[in-house]
């Protein structure tokens, strides 16, 4: 049986098309690792829940809660993990210790800096050393793995997040989508928010909309966003409609770089590095606290990128299903 593990909303969004594509073809069970508890209300079917025993360090707690938990792996001959969270690393490591096959979805992304993003860059590099099947979104990500001479089979399949977007029309309304949550930005979130708030005041013909991440390190700076429309975290479908009709995007997210490029949006990335280099200087633009306002002024007048989305065509899940049926042979 295949164990499919997820704990955050972005992980589930990217796994959902795969789950739908293998129903009735591959036996599987779902493991919820507990980061975004509200996600459970959106999922049908039987789900095994991991109990995370919180200690002084949240990352340690996640790893410790997965390890030595034999019930998770009963009757499991392969695991499917997505992305680069600490629970992905922990489930993969536990599977490796039991010589269970590891399938890594969204494999091969790299910034080459272990602290940007932290701890995700380490996690995905570590999973790549253990995985048996690497499902890469792009040729570049596959090349990264080939250059690292990892074990296992490497497949280029596109990014499954785009499978959720097929058929949604692109519009250009007078609103700017903003998302900020990255751990490496927590220490200077107040500065980012002040910069973005100044832009919202200057460009008041646009509505700046920010679904504010629930993390306390983000929420404590809510008062700085006086010129933005601040909303609670949105369901993915509602957020995507807003994204698809936006004029421009400001984010520190990874997945939104892919989604915005699919909708032909330019995206300001508030980070020092990105693991999604395929879209740089066409779809996405790295910004520092010093350069972000200038980049915004350039892009707000030139907001539609040229070329095709470099991250896939919205048909990744059907490719993955064929690979899993052939490789896992359940």
Image (spheres, rainbow, N blue to C red):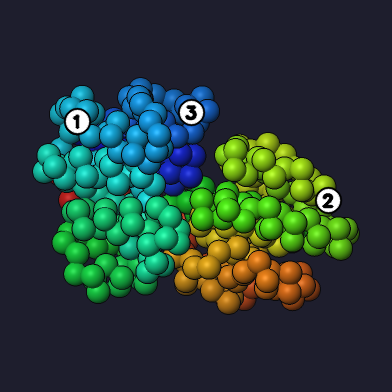
Q: Which residue carries the number 2 mark?
A: 227
* The quarter of the displayed image where residue 245 is located: bottom right
Residue drawn at (13%, 42%) of the image: 97
Residue 13: x percent and y percent? Answer: 47, 43
What's the mark number on residue 1? none
Mark nearer the N terminus (1 vs 2): 1
Mark nearer the N terminus (3 vs 2): 3
Taking depth in this image into account, of 124 and 276 the one nearest to the observer is 124
- In the displayed structure, 188 sits above or below 94; it is below
Is the Cβ of the residue at disc 1 closer than 8 Å to that at disc 2?
no
Residue 78: x percent and y percent? Answer: 19, 41
Residue 180 shows in this picture: yes
Q: Residues within 10 Å of mark 2 (few under 14, many from 20)?
A: some
Q: Which residue carries the number 1 mark?
A: 68
- In the displayed structure, 221 sits above or below 270; it is above
Residue 291: x percent and y percent? Answer: 67, 73
């Amino acid at each position: 049986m295949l164990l499919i593990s997820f704990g955050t909303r972005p992980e589930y969004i990217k796994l959902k098309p795969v789950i739908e594509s293998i129903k009735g073809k591959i036996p599987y069970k779902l493991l919820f690792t507990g980061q975004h508890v509200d996600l459970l209300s959106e999922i049908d079917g039987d789900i095994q829940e991991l109990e995370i025993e919180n200690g002084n360090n949240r990352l340690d707690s996640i790893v410790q809660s997965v390890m030595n938990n034999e019930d998770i792996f009963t009757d499991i001959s392969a695991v499917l993990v997505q992305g680069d969270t600490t629970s992905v690393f922990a489930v993969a490591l536990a599977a490796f210790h039991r010589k269970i096959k590891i399938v890594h979805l969204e494999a091969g992304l790299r910034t080459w800096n272990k602290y940007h993003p932290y701890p995700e860059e380490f996690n995905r590099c570590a999973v790549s050393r253990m995985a048996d099947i690497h499902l890469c979104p792009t040729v570049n990500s596959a090349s990264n793995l080939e250059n690292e001479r990892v074990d296992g089979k490497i497949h280029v399949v596109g990014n499954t997040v785009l499978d959720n977007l097929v058929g949604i029309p692109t519009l250009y309304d007078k609103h700017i989508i903003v998302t900020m949550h990255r751990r490496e930005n927590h220490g200077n979130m107040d500065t980012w928010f002040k910069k973005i708030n100044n832009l919202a005041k200057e460009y008041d013909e646009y509505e700046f909309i920010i679904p504010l991440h629930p993390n306390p390190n983000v929420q404590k700076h809510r008062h700085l966003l006086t010129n933005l429309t601040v909303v609670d975290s949105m369901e993915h479908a509602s957020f995507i409609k807003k994204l698809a009709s936006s004029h421009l995007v400001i984010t520190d997210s990874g997945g939104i770089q892919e989604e915005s490029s699919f909708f032909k949006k330019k995206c300001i990335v508030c980070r020092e590095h990105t693991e999604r280099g395929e879209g740089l200087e066409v779809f996405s633009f790295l910004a520092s606290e010093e350069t972000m306002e200038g980049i915004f002024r350039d892009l707000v007048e030139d907001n539609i990128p040229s070329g095709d989305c470099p991250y896939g065509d919205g048909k990744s899940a059907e490719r993955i299903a064929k690979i899993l049926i052939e490789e896992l042979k359940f």
